[in-house]
Amino acid sequence: MKLDRFEMERWQSVFEHRVRYNLSESGVDPLSLDELLELTGMENLGASILGYGQSNGSDKLRERIAALYDNVTPDEVVVTTGGAEANMAACWQLMEPGTPAAVMVPNYMQVPGLVRNFGGMVRPFELREESGWQPDLDQLRAILDDDVRFILITNPNNPTGTCLSSESRRGIVEAAERAGAWILCDEVYQGAELSGIPTPSMWGEYERTIVTNSLSKAYGTPGLRIGWIVAPADITETLWARTDFTTITPATLSDVLATAVLAPEARTRILARTRSILRNNLPLVTEWMESHNGLFSYHPPDAGAICYVRYDAPVNSSVLAEKLRAEKSVLVVPGDHFGMDHYLRLGFGPPVHELQEALEKMGDAFAEVVA
């Protein structure tokens, strides 16, 4: 099995704890354990037994995840160690060597890398900036045939922060039905909509659908490393069996805390915190960009603490990102990591004072490269 490197993840993993300002993250400022306990009203955490937990997630946690969807039972839920394991298990289930997958681009590049690592082929279909980062459905239909195993989408999207329109969703489902392909939908930013209106899940729109999600982005608890897969009951057992070869079981304390996070009242409070951060911070980024006299262009994100920014400066995005890291101690994600030069993915989830200081330093860097 070859290794197609996950460049963005490696960039973040090496440097995110070695810079003063981390704008590479796509979630909001994480909760502390004290904050989480206060928001959930948990007590007696110290009585938790640190044995192996139920390996597909505790019954109560799977009940609470199932309740987030229409017509889902706990038996159609597999809890995983983060969204990364959820995506890996789902891709492992769907992929066969030598077969193609239709992949929305730009996208979070874990699953395209997995497709290649499993010996498959990536057939891209593009989100068009001129249409507000909606997919080119004609292009999708043109690349589908009976060999395509699945269509990968991320909704809300990473890196653009855009939600699929109802027309786009309908077009993707119709294309999948004609080709007999599965849909694999990563919904990790669901719940982090600036409007407060939840993005509808792809679950229930088409029988050959698998959705993945986690507590990392909308819930501000990436350190819990809790994700999940929702899939038809006839393949859930196999998906669960695949995790026997990876992590075996979610961390016991993480399962306990995740169950508390997804209690209805606690979930409402935590998502309200997330949306408050997004609504307070995005104007700081947009005002900063607009103050630079046409240097930047962008489509306002619908969800997530990410803004995908095009810049008009004579410097490669990876070179620019390295300059920001090495000289300004600011970490951003270069567009090269999504196959698109002259873009940056800016995370705007940090505390306000950190975000403002980071933007000032970025302004200094751009002044130097365009001088």
Image: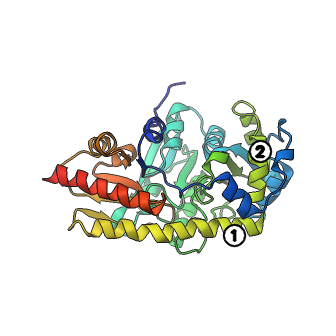
- Residue for point 36% across, 55% down: 358
x and y percentages locating residue 34 in the rendered image: 69, 55
Q: CA distance from mark 2 to mark 1?
A: 21 Å
Question: What residue is disc 2 on?
Answer: 253
**Of 109 and 236, which appears nearest the observer?**
109
* SS at circle 2: helix
State left or right for residue 46 relative to residue 243: right
x and y percentages locating residue 156 in the rendered image: 53, 61
Question: What residue is disc 1 on?
Answer: 268
x and y percentages locating residue 54 in the rendered image: 84, 42
State left or right for residue 67 relative to residue 167: right
Label 1 sits on what residue type?
Thr
State left or right for residue 318 relative to residue 176: left
- Residue for point 55% across, 70% down: 276
Q: Quadrant of the N terminus?
A: top right
x and y percentages locating residue 254 in the rendered image: 74, 46
**Of 277 and 93, which appears nearest the observer?**
277
> Alpha-carbon neighbours of circle 2 within 10 Å: few (<14), some, or many (≥20)?
some
**Of 304 and 45, which appears nearest the observer?**
45
- Residue for point 75% across, 52% down: 257
Label 2 sits on what residue type?
Leu
Residue 276 in the image: above or below residue 144: below
State left or right for residue 164 relative to residue 335: right
- Residue for point 86% across, 40% down: 49
* SS at circle 1: helix
> Alpha-carbon neighbours of circle 1 within 10 Å: few (<14), some, or many (≥20)?
some
Q: Earlier in the sequence, mark 2 or mark 1?
A: 2
